Image (cartoon, rainbow, N blue to C red):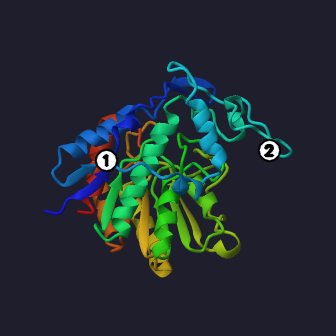
Amino acid sequence: MEKMSVFFNQKQLEFAPKYEWALGNRIKHPESTKRAESIFKALSKDKSFNIIEPKKIPMSAIRDVHDFHLWTLYNAAEQLPDDQEFYPSVFLQRAGIEPNPANIKHAGYYCFDSGTPLNNKTLSAAGWSAACALEATKTVASGKARVAYALSRPPGHHASFDTYGGYCYFNNAAIAARELKKKGRVAILDIDFHHGNGSQEIFYEDPDVMVISIHGDPREYFPYLIGFPTETGKGKGAGFNLNVILPTGTKIKAYENALKKQVFPIIKAYEPAHLIVSAGFDTYRLDPIGRFDIDTSEYERMGRLINDLGLPTVILQEGGYHTKDLGSNVRSFLQGFL
């Protein structure tokens, strides 16, 4: 039986944010190490998966996607004591400001929320998360496998060229897409409950990368200000961005209907050489952040549908915060590709 390659590095577990501020309340941070631990445990027990440690990501792969100031800021955070985290509290408007990314107190210039802290393990974990994405991408691009999965944690789809937030520091989907563009057109399908604003922003004017996000209504859910159907791309990228909004409580039948009738025809017409799936599992019925109603067994059906597109596919871990069942949900989805 052919095994699916899974990329993960234990250093991704060294980053453990303690809490976040949500609507004025201090709560236990949802993006905990238990997320990756749950997935790792579930896949380790299944002989269908081969867990591999990725190579360290070259600086050039990150600089192709992100302003170097982000790296500088995360590097400044490495100087923090072990017991300290920095949460931006001042978010000045950008016009006329010249921030210093080496000064961690200027982090609010680059961050767009108060739930994405910096500490002395942020850069290492985010770097290895991106490394997992790049290694999975190279495995597929080289033809060694048709499908590969990156257990990327922290996630990435909210990070843009020069901003971070939504628990995301480097945009793993964008790093993967930049690599795959060498082989032809790329489609990014973001199935996280929350809109992939960073991926949209990075490729909004790029005709060679189509970004499709299927998500909850941003009028009610993070990131609130972006992710609407009227956002279809700009310049040469006009027509190559699609946002599909589904209502609160969406079940698998309605979700599959949206995939079959709205998403898949556009992907097929675009004729990409490769597909990237930003796979968030906060669409799960018990997720504390998402508000869809999809069950564990139904993720395999979803994975099978996407697999039936027949495209070489890189699957990247994004959200999913019900840690008890997260591993089972990911395993179910990946089984749909085997």
Instruction: Report which residue position mark 2 lands on.
Output: 94
Q: Nearer the viewer, mark 2 or mark 1?
A: 1
Q: Is residue 183 left or right of residue 244?
A: left
Q: Is residue 55 visible?
A: yes
Q: Is residue 101 left or right of residue 211?
A: right
Residue type, label 2: Arg
Residue at x-position 24% and y-position 46%: 43
Near-viewer residue (138 or 283): 138
Q: Is residue 311 left or right of residue 231?
A: left
Q: Is residue 297 visible?
A: no
Q: Quadrant of the N terminus?
A: bottom left
Secondary element at tag 2: loop
Instruction: Report which residue position mark 1 lands on.
Output: 53
Near-viewer residue (65 or 173): 65
Q: Is residue 318 left or right of residue 325?
A: right
Q: Position of residue 166 (x, y in %)?
A: 56, 42
Rendered position, 111 above or below 196: above
Q: Quadrant of the C terminus?
A: bottom left
Number of marks drawn: 2
Q: Position of residue 82 (x, y in %)?
A: 50, 21
Residue at x-position 61% and y-position 53%: 66
